[in-house]
Image (cartoon, helix red, strand yellow):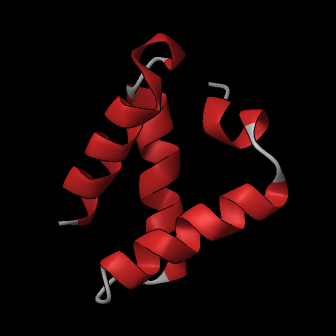
Amino acid sequence: MQNWFFSGVQKHEKTQFIGKLVKEFPGQSEEAVTEALVAACQEVKISEGREKLDEVIRAKLR
């Protein structure tokens, strides 16, 4: 399945977003955050938007 978040943003945006989540969830590694992001992209349709993606990622990291 295509990872629409990773294909839709530039590398520096990905890095910033993952870094932001690592800071927000200090018990999570960068690898764990990236895995949660990939899994969330598989669950959330692009039509549901970035807000829904953020919600699913945060739920996975809690």
Residue at horizontal 37%, vertical 34%?
51
Residue drawn at point x = 49 percent, y = 59 percent: 35
Instruction: For residue 43, say whether it is visible.
Output: yes
Q: Is residue 30 left or right of residue 57?
A: right
The residue depicted at 40 percent of the width and 17 percent of the height is 48
Most extreme residue toward the bottom, as rendered?
26
Give the left or right position of residue 13, taking residue 62 as reference. Answer: right
> What residue sits 68% from the left and 58% below the top?
14
Q: Position of residue 9 (x, y in %)?
A: 75, 42
27 or 55: nearer the viewer: 55
Q: Nearer the viewer, residue 11 or 2?
A: 11
Image position, residue 6 (x, y; %) = 70, 43
> In the drawing, does residue 3 fall left or right of residue 62?
right
Residue 19 in the image: state x and y as whole percent.
Answer: 55, 76
Q: Quadrant of the C terminus?
A: bottom left
Residue 20: x, y in percent? 49, 72
Q: Quadrant of residue 53?
A: top left
Residue 7: which quarter of the image?
top right
In the image, residue 41 above or below residue 15: above
Position of 57 relative to 28 (above/below): above
